Amino acid sequence: MDHEKAEPTRPNFNNLTMGLTTIFAVAIGDDWNYLMAMAYRAEGFVAIIFYPLVFIFMNLILLNLFLALLLKTFEERDDPNAVEAVDKAEEKTLAKL
């Protein structure tokens, strides 16, 4: 068999593009346990520690960012100055028509 022509498994960190793709797939939860199993076959026990940590930390970060944006949107709606500014902008737009 010709092992030099064999392609590496999907979850690899051989170059930056594949590394970022693998981290992104783990972060969004796209069958990350399969990626961990493939990495475990190739790299060993370190994959069992690395992949769950990445999954947990990325989900915490992404969830917090989403909630921060959501809360900011609700704060802007409750702010009377922001509502007045939007109303004035709408009035100007309608006056131009």
Image (cartoon, rainbow, N blue to C red):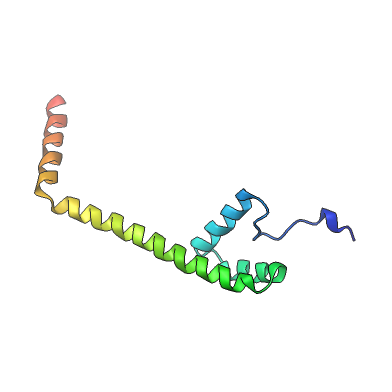
Instruction: Please state, as top left, top right, bottom left or bottom right, where the N terminus lies in the image.
Output: bottom right
Q: Among all residues in the image, which is located at the extreme front?
A: 46
Where, by quadrant of the figure, is residue 30 drawn? bottom right
Left/right of residue 45 with respect to residue 3 in the rendered view? left
Where, by quadrant of the figure, is residue 81 drawn? top left
Q: How many numbered circles does the render carry? A: 0
Tell me residue 26's x, y (percent): 54, 63
Where, by quadrant of the figure, is residue 78 drawn? bottom left
Q: Which of the two residues, 79 or 90, is positioned nearer the viewer here?
A: 79
Left/right of residue 71 with respect to residue 36 in the rendered view? left
Residue positioned 71% across, 67% down in the render: 42
Q: Which of the two residues, 9 or 60, is positioned nearer the viewer here?
A: 60
Q: Is residue 20 above or below residue 50?
A: above
Q: Is residue 31 above or below residue 69?
A: below
Residue positioned 83% across, 53% down in the render: 5
Residue positioned 43% across, 65% down in the render: 59
Q: Among all residues in the image, which is located at the extreme top?
A: 96
Instruction: Please state, as top left, top right, bottom left or bottom right, where the C terminus lies in the image.
Output: top left
Tell me residue 2's x, y (percent): 88, 57
Tell me residue 7's x, y (percent): 76, 56
Residue positioned 63% across, 53% down in the render: 18
Tell me residue 93's x, y (percent): 16, 30
